[in-house]
Image (cartoon, helix red, strand yellow):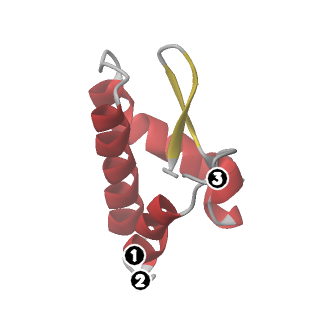
Amino acid sequence: MRTVVRTQEGVLELNYMWLPTWIGMNSIVKADLERALGESIVGMEMSDDTLNKVNDMVIDHLVKTNEHIEGLGDYLDGLKFVHFKTQDGEG
């Protein structure tokens, strides 16, 4: 899982349901992320590599703007280990 999800072709959204409430439900934090990262993301091809890059950008920005929270980067990076199993049991 990533901090961002593709909701429709060419559209990324913050994966707020899987983020800590103070990030996912905070319109000020979300607006800050959009303002800080939006221009560098617009026009990127929606590939897995891009999603991984944007995920890292979101994590880096949140860590940089919340330096007083130790371990935040590791916590958010840990989302990559969360996934839904498919019918055949694979992730």
Q: Is residue 26 visible?
A: no
- Give the mark toward the camera: 3 or 2: 3
- Give the mark toward the camera: 3 or 1: 3
- Give the mark toward the camera: 1 or 2: 1
Query: Closer to the camera, 84 or 57?
Result: 84
Residue 74: assigned label: 1
The residue beneath circle 3 is: 85
Give amino acid for label 2. Gly
Picture residue at 34% right of the left edge, 44% below the top: 52
Q: Distance between the Cα atoms at labels 3 and 2?
A: 27 Å
Picture residue at 46% right of the left edge, 44% below the top: 33
Q: Is residue 29 above or below residue 5?
A: below
Picture residue at 38% right of the left edge, 37% below the top: 51
Q: Position of residue 31 (x, y in %)?
A: 55, 40
Q: Distance between the Cα atoms at labels 1 and 2?
A: 5 Å
Left or right: where 66 falls relative to 22: left
Report helix, strand or loop for mark 2. loop
Left or right: where 67 falls relative to 24: left
Q: Are the two marked residues, 3 and 1, in contact with CB atoms closer than 8 angstroms?
A: no
Query: Closer to the camera, 56 or 35?
Result: 56
Q: Position of residue 36 (x, y in %)?
A: 36, 41
Picture residue at 32% right of the left edge, 48% below the top: 57
Q: Is residue 42 visible?
A: yes
Q: Are the two marked residues, 1 and 2, in contact with CB atoms closer than 8 angstroms?
A: yes
Quadrant assignment, res 41: top left
The residue beneath circle 2 is: 71
Report helix, strand or loop for mark 1. helix
Q: Earlier in the sequence, mark 3 or mark 1?
A: 1
Q: Position of residue 70 (x, y in %)?
A: 41, 86
